[in-house]
Each structure stands twice: as C-alpha cells, then as structure tokens.
C-alpha cells in the first residue's frame, strides 16, 4: 500500500509540473487541467492539449474494467483534450495513463 501511495503522489506531482510548464501567461487563461467528481461515484479528468506538443498526437481510446462498479476507467482524446472518467479510487491510474502517453510523445 505504501508503494501505491508514493506512485500516486509521484503522478500527481508530475501532473502539477506538466501544468506549470505550460503556464506562460496566456495558455492558462483559456486552457488547463480540470478534475471533477462523477455521481456514480468517480472522477472526471480533463487536460487541455491546445497549444502543447501533444495537441495533434494520436491517442487510442483506452477502456479498463468497465463492467466493474468499483475500479474502472476510460481515457480518450476529445475536442483537443485528454479526457478520462474513472472509479472513485482510480484517479491516480488515469493520471498515469496520461503521463505515460505524454512522456512517450514529447
């Protein structure tokens, strides 16, 4: 359990750094990172890609364990944004999906 906490914190810190690197006095006024809750319960993550090196990079939709009410996620690029929806305990997992894709493509 301790290791997964470290990994989750590492991914969150990586996302914070990714966001900060893109804040240039202009980008953050129209774009950014949004985390919201879902009522089933779960999370929604939206990371705007407009104006980043990832804006036109292909991302294949990923779905994981959609039949499970507890642990599931789906990640997709829609409207020039990485969008993820996941179970209540899977936010770190979808951040990890974004991180892996971003690091491979930057």
Image (cartoon, helix red, strand yellow):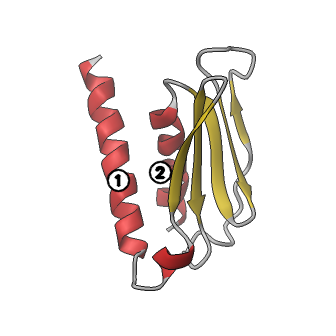
Q: Residue at x 69, y 55 (%)?
A: 59
In the rendered view, tell whether residue 36 sits above or below residue 23.
above
Left or right, 12 with respect to 27, comes to left
Q: How many marks?
A: 2
Nearer-the-camera pick, 39 or 64: 39
In what element is the residue under mark 2? helix
Q: Residue at x 75, y 64 (%)?
A: 79
Circle on res. 84:
none
Left or right, 32 with respect to 64, comes to left
Q: Residue at x 65, y 50 (%)?
A: 83
- Quadrant housing residue 68: top right
Nearer-the-camera pick, 101 or 65: 65
In what element is the residue under mark 1? helix
Circle on res. 14:
1
Q: Earlier in the sequence, mark 1 or mark 2?
A: 1
- Image location (x, y in percent) of residue 40: 67, 23
- Image location (x, y in percent) of residue 49: 60, 68
Q: Residues within 10 Å of mark 1 (few under 14, many from 20)?
A: some
Name the residue beneath numbered marker 2. Answer: 99
- Quadrant housing residue 42: top right
Left or right, 63 with respect to 44, comes to right
* Residue at mark 1 to residue at mark 2: CA–CA distance: 8 Å
Mark 1 and mark 2 residues within 8 Å of each other at the beta carbon: yes
- Quadrant housing residue 94: top right
Which quadrant holds the N terminus?
Answer: top left
Q: Residue at x 40, y 83 (%)?
A: 24
In the rendered view, tell whether residue 85 sits above or below residue 78.
above
Q: Residues within 10 Å of mark 2 (few under 14, many from 20)?
A: some
In the rendered view, tell whether residue 11 sits above or below residue 41.
below
**For the view shown, which residue lies furthest in the front direction?**
39
């Amino acid at each position: 359990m301790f290791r997964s906490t470290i990994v989750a914190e590492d991914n969150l810190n990586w996302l914070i750094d990714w966001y900060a690197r893109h804040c240039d006095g202009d980008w953050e006024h129209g774009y950014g990172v949004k985390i919201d809750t879902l009522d089933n319960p779960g999370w929604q993550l939206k990371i705007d890609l407009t104006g980043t090196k990832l804006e036109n990079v292909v991302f294949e939709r990923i779905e994981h364990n959609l039949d499970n009410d507890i642990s599931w996620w789906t990640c997709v690029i829609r409207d020039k944004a990485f969008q993820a929806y996941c179970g209540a305990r899977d936010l770190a997992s979808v951040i990890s999906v974004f991180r892996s894709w971003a690091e491979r493509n930057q």
